[in-house]
Amino acid sequence: MPIRTVLRMGEPKLLQVSSAVDPSKIISPEIQELIQDMTDTMKSLNGAGIAAPQIGVMFRIVIFGFEKSIRYPDALPVPSTVLINPIITPLSLETESGWEGCLSVPGIRGKVDRVKAIRYQGFDQDGNVIDRSVEGFHARVVQHECDHLDGYLFPMRVTDFSQYGFEDVLFKN
């Protein structure tokens, strides 16, 4: 399947709210091809996740997961997941700050506060129900990717711009 172009910050589509996928259409060739293209695109860029709007498709689909991340080498593994029509429920009000980057904001990192523990629900690529409670980096990735479905990019969540900048400057060693 083709590697798709990832839209970059400034593209108006990244600020739009995405449409839900009709559950009866999840197994359609169109949605299955989109999921494969998203997976291939994410892997080709060593991403931890990707959302359909990042490749210009305004559906509520996110993909995330890795065994070992080149971009987040200290992160624990996150199971490879296709999540369609996600619903996120915070499990507490406790937040934690962590570094984030984005395929749509290449070369930039920033510290973002996210809810530490969440429950997420939706459908997988076969139309099966997903219902998981997670915390830490796994919860961060899900929240980051699902933000794209509502027109948010991680820089919109940064509150301390002394903790925001180019990766090669912030992390030079």
Image (cartoon, rainbow, N blue to C red):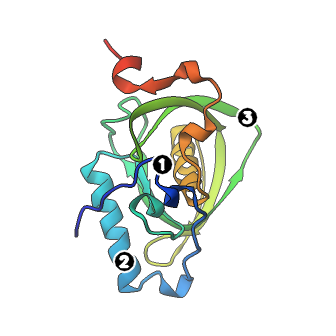
Disc 3: which residue = 94
What's the residue at 46%, 25% (across, down)?
A: 165
Q: Quadrant of residue 123?
A: bottom right
Q: CA distance from mark 3 to mark 2?
A: 36 Å
Q: CA distance from mark 1 to mark 3?
A: 31 Å
Q: Quick one: quadrant of the N terminus?
A: bottom left
Left or right placement of residue 120 versus residue 79 in this view: right
Q: In screen coordinates, is 153 left or right of 70?
A: right
Q: What type is the residue that disc 1 sits on?
A: Gly
Q: Nearer the viewer, residue 157 or 36?
A: 157
| Neighbours of disc 2 within 10 Å: few (<14), some (14-19), many (20+) | some
Q: Secondary structure at mark 1?
A: loop
The numbered disc on residue 10 is: 1
Q: Secondary structure at mark 3?
A: loop
- Marks 1 and 3, the one that precedes in the sequence: 1
Does label 1 or label 2 sit earlier along the sequence? 1
Callout 1 touching callout 2 (CB < 8 Å): no
Q: Give the total of numbered labels.
A: 3
Q: Which residue is mark 2?
A: 32
Determine whether the residue tagged by mark 2 lies in a helix, strand or loop.
Answer: helix
Where residue 5 sits: x, y (%)? 31, 58
Dot 3 amino acid type: Glu
C-alpha distance separating marks 1 and 2:
28 Å
Can you give x and y, in whole percent of width and height, for residue 73 in the image? 35, 31
Amino acid found under the numbered disc labelled 2 = Gln
